[in-house]
Image (cartoon, rainbow, N blue to C red):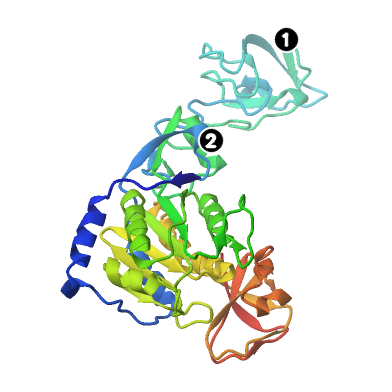
Amino acid sequence: MEKRTMHPPHPIVAATFAAMRRPSLMPKMAGKQVTLEHAQELLCDAVSPMAESESCSLLEAMDRIAFEDIHADLPIPSFDSSPVDGYALRHEDSKGACPEHPARLPVTRLVFAGGGAPLPLGPGEAARVMTGAMIPQGADCVIRQEDTDRGEKFVSVYKQARWQENFSFCGENIRKGQLLVSRGQQLNFAHVGLAAGQGHAEIQVFRRPRVAVMACGDELTQQNDVLLTGKIYDISTLMLLSKLKSIGMYPVIAENTADNVPALCERILALLGDNDFVITTGGTSEGQHDFMPAVLDKIGGTCLFRGLAMHSSKQVTAMRIGEKILLCLSGNPFSAAANFALLGKPALCKLAGHSQFFLQRQKGIARNFFHKPSPLRRLVPAKITGQDVSIPPQAYATAMLTSLTECNCMVDILPSAKSVKLGDTIDVILC
């Protein structure tokens, strides 16, 4: 993770502040509360996949996003080969063979894996072949060495072979021209193996989006500093940076700045100039020391939404400024983490080049009771195993970050529901 310092004003900074000096052009924050689904669509529609790619060694390609389709230049295997240690021959030459009356054939050649193309096999001959070796022309089957006396000059075959028995055909696993990796696909170990099998040492992947995280609030203290009375350690920044790293982003730490409107405006605009996406936490409410609404008024841009019609999401705001996105989250670490998972992650995955970026939903069975007094829609952290969904007791309090430690999903509770009962079929968002 990179720590950023202030740079000379970026063009987007200069242009925005020039407009801010003219009071008649100061935009007022617009926007209204929207549903979660609408917010996801608005945010994802506002971003496009990265245009830049970079070359990545196969050793470093795990979990990166493929920038282009990869097709097979070579069939695999690239020749007819033996999948076993044994003897290549014509199946007709083993007709009627059994332990009591074996077929006895001269062994005219020995073929190892990587030994090149052997000479063609004549009628009544056998070739000793090892696993992976090229099968000689003229042979139409391979007898396992366990079904012979393993002879070196002559071999006794104890069973009748079938046509094309123990035969790995050219292109049997991969055809020439076959699509191996699709653009936008997250690479796993198998994709790495497929590329390696085609002789690739490197692969073109999407550049990692640079995502800056800035926490707002004079009450925040960094982890190495002495915690003075009335101060708290900054939790949200490191938590979000860790999550960004886990989903393949390039996380950037933004240094704290003075908690006032001009300083915040300048810092946010500088971050937007240097990074692909900016996330802030804190200062989004309507208290006397919550400056983000005023900051967003002065920065301008297009407000995608301000607040979700959902518990603990009433202040989350997203704006598009030029080609960049600013996502403003609550200073509450629990709410910041939850709304990042629901909104930030899908948009960033699209930006990073993922072909599938919306969160997955499924049905589950509630394994405990949860009371929802709020009339608003609520998403509660939970743990799903198979179809069993358990809601931790700490989920009642949105300030309880401990409820996230073992959770891998969120239970979607609609406004009309007052509780989740044991055995209920519930909607689950995987995150």
* Disc assigned to residue 193: 2
Q: How far apart are marks 1 and 2 (CA)?
A: 36 Å
List x then y, in percent, for residue 129: 64, 18
Q: State the residue at coordinates (64%, 82%).
A: 425
Instruction: Tell me the quarter of the picture where residue 108 sits.
Output: top right
| Looking at the image, residue 44 lies above or below residue 374 | above
Q: State the residue at coordinates (76%, 26%).
A: 147
Residue 1 visible in this rendered orientation of the protein: yes
* Disc assigned to residue 152: 1
List x then y, in percent, for residue 127: 63, 15
Q: State the residue at coordinates (67%, 10%).
A: 106
Between 311 and 13, the one nearer to me in the picture: 13
Q: In which quarter of the image is the C terminus?
A: bottom right
The amino acid on which the numbered mark 2 sits, given as a three-letter code, is Gly
Within 10 Å of disc 1 (Cα), the crowding (few <14, some 14-19, many 20+) is: few
Instruction: Tell me the quarter of the picture where residue 262 sits.
Output: bottom left
The amino acid on which the numbered mark 1 sits, given as a three-letter code, is Glu
| Looking at the image, residue 190 lies above or below residue 402 | above
List x then y, in percent, for residue 143: 68, 25
Q: What element carries label 2?
A: helix
Q: Is residue 363 left or right of residue 359?
A: right
Q: What element carries label 1?
A: loop
Question: Of the residues tagged 1 and 2, which is closer to the observer?
Answer: 2
* Disc assigned to residue 367: none
Residue 360 visible in this rendered orientation of the protein: no
Q: In this view, does 406 lie to the left or right of 59?
A: right
Between 303 and 22, the one nearer to me in the picture: 22
